[in-house]
Image (cartoon, rainbow, N blue to C red):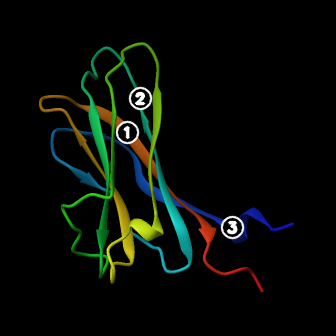
Amino acid sequence: MHKGSENLKVTVGIPPQEITAAEKAGTGVDMAKFNNFMAVIQQAAATQYLGDVTCVIAESTDNSTFSNTYLATTTISSNTATDQIATVECKGENMTAGYRYLRVEITPAAGTVNPVSASNVRFNPRFAAV
């Protein structure tokens, strides 16, 4: 049996905060040792927070300049009744050759304020633990 810490790496992508119409980029992660990436996004809902949020996965060769061609996209629809959790994920094999880093980026609908947070989850290690 493997330990979860050997097969799964979870880090903060975007700490809890309110974001407006500007894109909020998460912390980049190195995919050299993992085959899969998933961002878990939580949007807190209340009557004053209306609007969808679009969540994408961007890739980079150097963990600083990220592509505008996204590997995956999902939208969390506005809902005033409950909090919403969604995931956006991709496999390492879908990454462009030479690219090594991924990050989640969240953009809310224009004219809205959205309290969100995101976690980076890397899993399915490329090599077995020694």
Q: Which residue is mark 1?
A: 116
Q: Where residue 76 sits: x, y (%)?
A: 35, 32
* Residue at screen point 46% across, 18% down: 82
Q: Quadrant of residue 20?
A: top left
Q: Which residue is mark 2?
A: 44
Amino acid at pointer 2 = Ala
Q: Where residue 49 sits: x, y (%)?
A: 28, 23
Vertical placement of 95 versus 115: above or below?
below
Vertical placement of 17 versus 102: above or below?
above
**Residue 40 visible from this viewpoint:** yes
Task: Tell me: 42 left or right of 66.
Answer: right
Identify the mark nearer the N-term, 3 or 1: 3
Identify the mark nearer the N-term, 1 or 2: 2
* Residue at screen point 39% across, 78% down: 100
Picture quarter with the N terminus: bottom right
Picture quarter with the C terminus: bottom right
Q: Quadrant of residue 81?
A: top left
In front: label 3 or label 1? 3
Task: Tell me: 129 left or right of 74.
Answer: right
Q: CA distance from mark 1 to mark 2?
A: 6 Å
Task: Tell me: 52 left or right of 120.
Answer: left
Q: Which residue is mark 3?
A: 7
Amino acid at pointer 1 = Val
Report the front residue among 91 and 11.
91
Q: CA distance from mark 2 to mark 3?
A: 29 Å
Neighbor class of circle 1 (other Cα within 10 Å; few <14, some 14-19, many 20+) is many
